[in-house]
Amino acid sequence: MVRRKAASSQQAYNSADGSAEGLNCCVQLTKQPDKGAVVDVFVVQICGSIRAPSDTYRAVVRVLITDVTDGMSAVRSVHSRVEQWQMRDSPAFCYETDLGKIPNTAIILSDWMIVARLRLDWLTFPRKGKRNLQFTTSILSGQSGEELARGAYTIAYENSEFGYIDLQENIEQARTLTVALAFAVSAADNKLYNCEVELIKNWARGNIDFSKASNRAERKLEKALNKTVGFFRDGNQIDVCRICKEIVEMVPIAVRYDILDLCLHVAQANGVATAEELCLLKDLASWLEVGMDRFREMVGKILPVSMHQVKDLEFVLGVNPDMGKNETLQRLSKEYRKWNARVTNSDPQIRKQADNMLDFIAKARSECVA
Amino acid sequence: MANIAGIDLGTTFSGLAILNSVGRPEIVPNADGERLTPSAIFFDEENSQIIRVGIEAVNSRYLNAQRSVRWIKRYMGDGDYRRNINGKEWTPVELSSLILKKLKQDCSAERGEIREAVISVPAHFDEVRRKATMDAGTMAGLNVIGIVNEPVAAALYYATTREICGKVLVYDLGGGTFDVTIMDVRGHNMEIICSQGDHALGGVDFDAEILKMLEQVYKEKFDTELITSDEDRAKYEDEAEDIKKTLSRRKVAKKMLYGPAGNVKTEITREAFEQAISSLIARTDILLEVALEEARIEPSEVDKVLLVGGSTRIPLVQKNLKKRFGFAPETTVNVDECVALGAALHAGLTMLRERPDAVPAGISSGLKDINLTDVCNHSYGTICAPIDKKTGRRVIENRIILKKNTPLPCESTQMFYTMSEGQREVEVTITQGEDTAVEYVNKIATHRFKLPPGRQARCPIKVTYSYDVNQRMHCKFEDVQSDRVLEVDFSLDQNGAISESDVSQKAGELEALKVE
């Protein structure tokens, strides 16, 4: 006997094609423990009939998820964050697992059988907000891949995170804001060097979307860039903190790393990072919510200490005045260990930088102990 | 049979010791009767075929600094460093080989042929520098049977000549480098726990601080520079060294400065000197703490501190150590000679292990109870491309497989996976270094590992690195599904930039030169 499981509170409605191929599918969103934490999981179950070409036939179960919020004519894929569950040629989610051997050519599952537990954090949806997700569960031949049975189920889900389409749009918007931040770094010392301006312009040309590429769009970008240069050359300022907060709301950490990366390159472009530029960079890292360790790592690679007009202990080594003596010494030891391992690097520039850092650390320690 | 020798190829001084008939190491004096030879080279102005090494080269610097070379060890392994003399571009390896040739030549004349030798290097020297040191030895006509870390050599000598037991810290502050090694010693059983080193910290840096003080005194008095030529600089570098040595015995050192604007008598106090070197001393303190941390021991758990290297004579160094450990460091043996003496012992142990039949019975018997367990000097890894958990992006990073300070012999395995469907090869890179970021590690070898066709992504590749007591590394890459294997062997005489034929050719060229 085939029973349909009652819809839970997360299940807004059942799909109309649930038993089109003799197989019924049902999905529930539940919580389950995982390595000491509790994670959200879509539990996929099946019941109904499966027909196999022969007895003891090996079968595979496959689950695909699509976003049907905008109707069946505008189906969008749900992406997998985990490489293992991606399709061969796209990031679309595709879960497959061995179902074992089907004992008879015609089998009827009278009770619901769990065939997959899909972690929510594996998935990326197209957009934020209320989504209708269609789970298509297929039973495939383990040998030929031929579909033996299929069932589908649609579930409503409230997505609290940005979807991949949202993200793409946000990234494009954030790139425009990035240009403003980069110019703010360049203008922090009241001088916009040509090398800095060119670096920012080149970045903008390469990163701001030209999907509707046309000469007109390019001209528009050039005009906007020149206008921005003029704005900063006139001594105007922007609210960097507000822009950063806006960016934090819009884009993930990886994009914020890219923004900081550009700003560090701008500060490095003319060979000297002024005190004002360094101060703004530190603020940017904090406002963009990039961890200070990661920030210092980026500084080490892009803006070596020899370029710093003012050598700031906190900026370079992460030592701040609130730290006690022991904590300061431990921090310095950690930095020393890191840079001492780099003094024999095959790149002479890295060797030189490591030497400078060791001197700087030693002086800092000497002052701390004194 | 020829002598078994140990050589301390130092930044400022070098020395050679051989094992006597009962396996005890003895320093062999040079042709001038000196137990140590300055690591200085001077190319004769009259006869380009004559090269002077030692004290004569030091003195000749004052006459023509352009034709003299000192502290070449600091450039060992630096592929960019060249010294042009008589139109020839001399590399650090070639220049170092001249010092070794002088030692070999003088000591062979004194005690019979010197051929099999172990050369000591700072503990922090990487594979390239170790290989460069071996090449220098080969060019000098030596059969370099091994390389030993300087603090290990020193500890070996201490432990076989003194009653030492427990956790021993070897504090090696030499002419140009600084190493700290912590070891566990039980009679003649020695286990290295860890080594840490600073490549540019030693006597020459202390001398440089004194030289700055002298220049400042002169500038303040005459408002002009004391040093106006390389020869002046050479002279005052040695004056600075003298002052440093004096300040190790007395509280004040006096010196007359003869400059272009007139003469001035100056006094440098020990206090002022200690102030000037405070940041260098801070560097030694940090390294010491890093070593203790690495060994996971507190200063109170250290039973003995052994001093090695001439710079340990500086009173501030000894005072600091006493303050930190609560007892005075050991100063009973000659800190300048113990590395060469220990290197000779190490050479004997290496010969016993590799060619026992070639070791005379007396030496064999003298060394039979000594047991040394060394550690991996650096971390070794490979480059992979995992997904960054935070950003979700694929990143290229160095993954350490064999960790620094792992006792030898050692072996470690990690599993990696192919990235794409149908992947036909993997570029395998063997790295040396402690960082995750690939730009901060040295790539010591890269190979292409061919894979079978038509496979899914994420096929496992098992990577195993092993390191034996003779400092030979073996890397094995296994494709688990197909059983295909790529094996790469490294030993100190294989993996450097200079090929064996180049070394032989250069050895032939140097043979023609007369080293005095």
Image (cartoon, coloured by chain):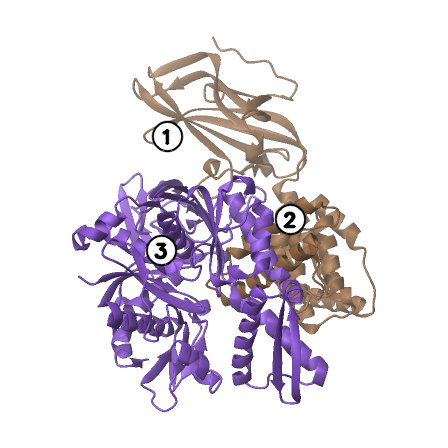
Chain colours: A brown, B purple
Is any part of residue B351 visible from this angle?
yes
* Residue at 74% over, 63% down: A275
Q: Please indicate whether residue B179 sits to the left or right of residue B226 in the image.
A: left
Badge 2 marks a residue whose secondary structure is helix
Front residue of this view, candidates B394 and B168: B168
Quarter of the image with the N terminus of chain B in it: bottom left
Residue A261 coordinates in the image, percent (x, y):
63, 57
- Front one among A155 and A276: A276
Tell me if B255 is positioned left or right of B145 in this view: right
Q: Name the residue under label 3.
A: B342
Q: Name the residue under label 1.
A: A146
Q: Residue A328 location, x and y as percent?
A: 67, 48
Q: Is residue A60 above or below residue A198?
A: above
Q: Is residue A222 above or below residue B451?
A: below
Residue type of the residue flagged with mark 3: Gly
Q: Residue A190 is drawn in which quadrant? A: bottom right
Q: Which mark is residue B428?
A: none
